Image (tube, grey):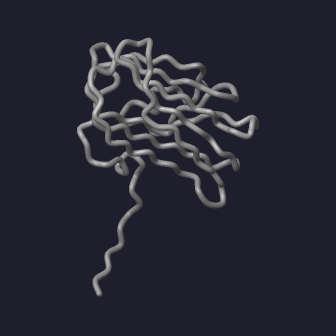
Amino acid sequence: MRKKIISSVSQEENYPDQDWLNMEEIASVEITSEDSSHPIESALLSGCTNGWLAASSGEQTIRLIFDQPQRLQRIWLNFIETQQVRTHEYVLRWSADGQTFQEIVRQQWNFSPAGDTNEVGDYHVELQEVTVLELIINPDISGGNGFASLAKLKLA
């Protein structure tokens, strides 16, 4: 039997191989709130590891507005919750005209600090002429005081 000791892999290296879009160059972002120590850029830009955290509890919206219409083939999301037990729900939707939206996915996940702390959504899509991509997060569907968070969002 062959054995090899490997070092821990950083979060940045855990992303699936892909030519990801450079969000800083192609889009602006609108958000309902953000904690100053966890700004939205931390979830959207390469090299950032803190992720985004809402400044207030309750439902939150992250809206990416593209400078030019985009073709999207992959949407990769990562949510991490290590502190509290909660069930969150997110809705990912897109628009070609900025007014009417089509839902891509609606997903619920149960976080448990003693078990499931990491949710990854990896969606292979074929979307043309996307002008707006919107992520709506309900951090605690039971109505608790959960704070929405997003470790990473990557697009290709």
In the picture as drawn, the residue positioned furthest to the bottom comes out as 1
**Side of 137 relative to 126 (left or right):** right
Measured along the vertical axis of the image, is residue 82 above or below residue 34?
below
Q: Residue at x 60, y 46 (%)?
A: 81
Residue 121: x and y in percent read: 44, 45
Residue 50 seen in this snapshot: no
Measured along the vertical axis of the image, is residue 154 above or below residue 27?
below
Residue 28: x and y in percent read: 40, 16
**Side of 38 relative to 147 (left or right):** left
Measured along the vertical axis of the image, is residue 95 above or below residue 136?
above
**Side of 66 relative to 148 (left or right):** left
Q: Residue at x 40, y 51 (%)?
A: 10
Residue 92 seen in this snapshot: yes
Measured along the vertical axis of the image, is residue 147 above or below residue 120?
above
Q: Residue at x 32, y 80 (%)?
A: 3
Q: Quadrant of the C terminus?
A: top left
Residue 126: x and y in percent read: 28, 34
**Side of 124 relative to 11 (left or right):** left
Q: Residue at x 47, y 21 (%)?
A: 63
